[in-house]
């Protein structure tokens, strides 16, 4: 009976926290359909408008390691509540902003709140659920978060069209601020990690210890390689690529772009169930996804003049699975990081995919500028090579760290039916002795 009460309590806490995460994803994507209105409201061009996205993603990526440290130091409840407060405040500022700098300030505050959310949620999942359930709950959380992305598309567009900029974003911001009371009142963390808070190492040592674990390095590159394609396409370049690069009608392009979100919602529980029940399948799942991703880009970029819409939809469905597959990285962290350092390791790993997303979005933009003299289709073919390059780098590093971790433990443990045992100091030293210069 005690176990049943504990399980129900964990699910209730997770439910409150995951609603906050859904709100974070909504706020993150809320500028997508508001772009044309933002151009007029702030009197800027497309390049300045893209700065909102680059700023937000950049803040998110740069805040992940500090977020992990904060979560380990102060607990998930406080940081999650702070995240909700910052999300609401940022959206309120954005709602009332009439100047471009003030609008940037609003998105910066919102981005900071968004950056604090996911690591806090994963900390709650790690302390509230068993290792076997962790992958399923984490991927389900990600899938439910994608519903916030759905709400930020045509429903938000309809509300903006009906009541306008200020009422829409002001209501979203004030509602989020009110929800902070629920997270503060109901979110609680498991007791095990708290017992170690009084004897934590210095922050710098904590980060070094997390990065020294080979499992953290492997998880970093898994996350880097798997999630950036769907991120760069859904946040910024997917719609222009479909319309200008492939010549789709705008309405059709919007439907195809929604596949990136629907795929995450559908794929999350599927990937989570597989990764949770079959640890031996995790790395093959990652490598299989990376192979399919590369194959999709090969088809999209070599088919002339443009692939059929069915091929494009199938490719975007594959890209959508990058988000669910990226949660394999957090399952690796959950099993091999000590309880008092799981937030720090999670923050390091979570920074990987979002840094890759920012690099991918920036790289596509730079190549578009350099290829300005080409026809639109050829211009976008050249620009999308930035995402292919990141994919190749991420896949190469993932394979190398899979082999190094397997070699360090004396067997190919990642491909067997039991999870990789936690690395001891001798394992870490052996890896670092030969690979300390590797990023």
Image (cartoon, rainbow, N blue to C red):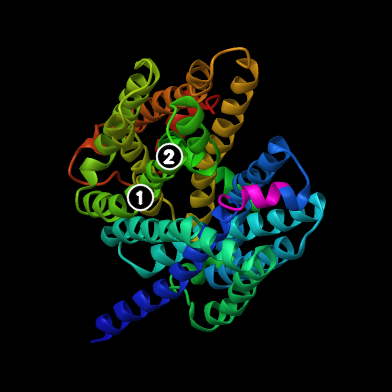
Q: Which residue was labeled with disc 1?
A: 264
Indicate the position of residue 59 as horizontal and vertical percent values. 66, 48
Work out which quarter of the rendered image holds the N terminus and state it: bottom left
Q: Nearer the viewer, residue 266 or 81?
A: 266
The answer to whether residue 14 shows anywhere in this view is: yes
* Residue 111, horizontal then vertical, whole percent: 64, 54
Question: Which numbered mark, 2 or 1, is in the foreground of this view?
Answer: 2
Where 414 falls versus 3 (above or below)? above
Name the foreground residue: 286 vs 424.
286
Residue 406 visible to an observer of this rendering: no
In the displayed image of the protein, which residue is found farthest to the top? 373
**In screen coordinates, is 285 left or right of 118?**
left
Between marks 2 and 1, how big is the CA–CA gap?
Answer: 18 Å
Using the rendered view, name the quadrant where residue 388 is placed.
top left
Mark 2 Cα within 10 Å, few/some/many (few <14, many 20+)?
many
| Magenta stretch in the rendered image | 32-39
Residue toward you, 195 or 234: 234
Disc 1 on helix, strand or loop?
A: helix
Mark on residue 253? Answer: 2
Q: Position of residue 36 (x, y in %)?
A: 64, 47
């Amino acid at each position: 009976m005690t176990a049943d009460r504990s399980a129900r309590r964990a699910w209730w806490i997770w439910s409150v926290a995951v609603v906050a995460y859904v709100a974070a994803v909504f706020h993150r994507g809320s500028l997508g359909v508001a772009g044309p209105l933002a151009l007029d409201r702030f009197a800027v061009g497309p390049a300045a408008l893209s700065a909102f996205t680059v700023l937000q993603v950049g803040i998110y990526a740069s805040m992940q390691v500090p977020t992990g440290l904060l979560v380990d130091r102060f607990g998930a409840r406080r940081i999650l509540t702070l995240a909700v407060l910052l999300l609401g405040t940022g959206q309120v500022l954005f709602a009332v902003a009439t100047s471009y700098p003030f609008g940037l300030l609003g998105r910066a505050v919102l981005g900071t709140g968004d950056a604090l959310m996911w690591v806090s949620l994963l900390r709650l999942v790690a302390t509230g659920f068993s290792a076997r359930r962790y992958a399923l709950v984490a991927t389900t959380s990600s899938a439910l978060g994608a519903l916030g992305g759905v709400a930020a598309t045509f429903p938000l567009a309809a509300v903006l069209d009906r009541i306008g900029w200020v009422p829409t974003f002001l209501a979203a911001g004030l509602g989020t601020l009110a929800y902070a009371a629920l997270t503060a009142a109901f979110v609680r963390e498991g007791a095990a990690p708290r017992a170690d808070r009084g004897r934590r190492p210095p922050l710098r040592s904590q980060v070094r210890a997390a990065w020294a674990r080979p499992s953290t390095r492997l998880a970093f590159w898994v996350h880097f390689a798997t999630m950036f394609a769907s991120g760069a396409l859904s946040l910024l370049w997917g719609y222009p690529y479909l319309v200008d690069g492939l010549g789709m009608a705008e309405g059709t392009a919007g439907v195809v772009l929604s596949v990136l979100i629907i795929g995450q919602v559908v794929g999350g529980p599927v990937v989570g169930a597989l990764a949770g029940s079959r640890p031996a399948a995790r790395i093959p799942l990652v490598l299989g996804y990376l192979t399919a991703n590369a194959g999709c880009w090969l088809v999209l970029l070599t088919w002339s003049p443009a692939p059929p819409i069915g091929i494009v939809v199938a490719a975007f469905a594959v890209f959508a699975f990058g988000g669910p597959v990226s949660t394999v990285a957090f399952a690796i962290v959950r099993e091999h990081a000590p309880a008092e350092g799981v937030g720090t390791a999670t923050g390091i790993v979570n920074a990987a995919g979002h840094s890759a997303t920012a690099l991918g979005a920036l790289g596509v933009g730079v190549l578009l500028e350099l290829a300005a003299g080409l026809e639109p289709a050829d211009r976008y073919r050249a620009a999308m090579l930035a995402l292919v390059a990141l994919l190749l780098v991420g896949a190469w590093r993932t394979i190398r760290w899979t082999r190094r971790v397997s070699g360090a433990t004396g067997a190919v443990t990642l491909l067997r039916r039991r999870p990789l045992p936690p690395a001891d100091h001798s394992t870490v030293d052996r890896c670092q002795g030969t690979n300390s210069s590797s990023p």
